[in-house]
Amino acid sequence: TFQLLAGGQSAQAAEATGRTAAAGAVEQFTVPLTVPPVLAPYRRTKAADYYRVTMRRASTEILPGTRTDVLTYNGSFPGPTIRARSGRTAVVQQVNALDMPTSVHLHGGNNPVADDGGMMDTIAPGRSRTYVYENEQPGATLWTHDHAHHMESEHVYRGLSGAYLLGDRNEDALGLPSGAYDIPLVLRDAAFDENAAMVYTMDDADNRTTILVNGRPWPYLKVEGRKYRFRLINSCNLRIFVLALTDGTTDQHPVQQIGSDGGLLAAPAETPVMVLSPGERIDFVVDFAQYAPGTKLTLSNMLGPGPTELVGQVMRFDVGEKTPDSSRVPAALATLPALPKPTVERTFELNMDEPGTGSHQAYINGRTFDANRIDTTIRWGATEVWTVANKSTTIPHNFHTHLVQFRILERDGAAPYPAEAGLKDTVLLFPGQVAKLQLTFNSHRGVYPYHCHMIDHSAMGMMGQMKIV
Ligand code: C2O
Ligand code: CU
């Protein structure tokens, strides 16, 4: 299956050398991982935290010793992390100090349409907008990113994304690694020219060969010999990661996946590989106490034909001395909502003009996005089963729904992997693949989109609108 991925990512082999034009001097694992700052509220009341964010241009060090112009939330690349609490409102004022319209979408959030950051609901340059997030949903790894129509793909690429980590009481009681041992890893790729400028070309997966974690190229992280929780967010426009931990001789170092897009899994899933397409999140725990101090483990992206053929690196963990660790990963993590009986079935076919045809058009059910068209009308409260098929022969796609978490019932007729059996808002579809999803529309009325989250594709029209009535 992983071979099929190579079609859309053929130049990935070049990445194995760890070099790009401007990154010629970047040796892998020489730059320390940084963790984006946690945004402090400027005001707290009994029920809500108030934040202010300014979207502005900044110049930042990405490749060592060079400066790169980026688009930022508060000057940070990626944006600062918001740590919110389930059931407690976060009020985020977004000031647009850029010279183009923006829209801030909380991906995976459960909010009224007016606060969703839709693609047409933009903030004009010089204006601001206050989004109210009620956080009426279980704890989860969410993220914010730009969604201004036809611009989202370049805006996100240039830096408008950041983690939004929602905690809750159930999670507190579990005793998972927390505080400094709970680290977001925002993954992405980029293409740089010889002046270290980021180059954006629509649908140009092949040249985005520098891998950044939290904005730094192929970083390393010194870890203590104890458990850590990591929140992977794939904020790439197009790249799919198939990640394994390897010590250079074997990649058989399974991790414990504890969560997916919409929150914790029912039970931890021991997984040798973590598959993460754009927009998806994986929450996992590694116990570094099992490795001798001095062990170096790389998080590698395996897209080769064989299970041990490593095609690219992402980052490295340098294991230190054992330290006291009272955290744990209980055998039961969360109770997933029941699956009501579905009453409606629908089919969605994803397709786009093949690369090389010179055409940049993408479709769902044969139609390219039209903001004035409602593609799907749904009754509030309904439970539906959606069959989503990737009709492209060489290009992977995925499928993301706004404001509703779904469950994957089947993938090509088989049960989903344990790692994707929890709450999901984005599902990866390899070329030719079909997934069956179950969705219950019991939160917000109004019009909102579903789309491929390989966002160059959604910018090319692989997006539709549903209306919940
Ligand atoms: Cu993260 Cu409409 O998407
Ligand atoms: Cu796509």
Image: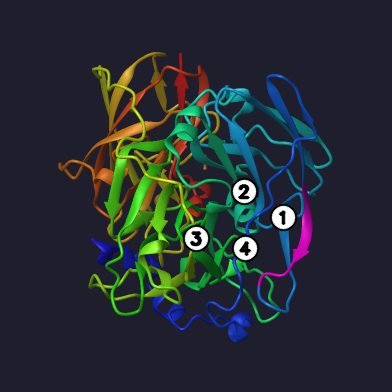
Q: Is 46 covered by the magenta stretch?
A: no
**Residue at screen point 53% across, 23% down:** 136
- Which quarter of the rendering shows the N terminus? bottom left
Give the SS element for disc 2: strand
Check disc 4 and give the amino acid type.
Gly
Outermost residue, bottom direction? 25
Provide the residue designation for mark 4: 215
Q: How far, Cα to Cα, is label 1 from label 2?
A: 9 Å
Q: Residue furthest right?
A: 126
Asked if labels 2 and 1 touch by Cβ distance under 8 angstroms, the answer is yes
Please give the residue where the numbered disc 1 appears in the rendered image.
76
Q: Earlier in the sequence, mark 4 or mark 3?
A: 4
Q: Mark 1 or mark 4, which has the lower sequence index?
A: 1
**In the displayed structure, would residue 322 be above or below residue 122?**
below
Location of mark 3 (residue): 323
Q: Position of residue 143 (x, y in %)?
A: 56, 43
Q: Is residue 456 left or right of residue 40?
A: left
Q: Which residue is mark 2?
A: 162
Whether tag 1 and tag 4 are in contact, CB under 8 A, the answer is no
Q: Residue, x 51% and y 65% (percent of image)?
A: 223
- Which callout, 1 or 2, points at the residue further toward the start of the chain? 1
**With respect to residue 113, does 325 lie above or below?**
below
Q: Name the amino acid, label 2.
A: Gly
Q: Residue at x 62, y 63 (%)?
A: 215
- What whole-number distance in Å separates the C-alpha atoms at marks 3 and 2? 30 Å
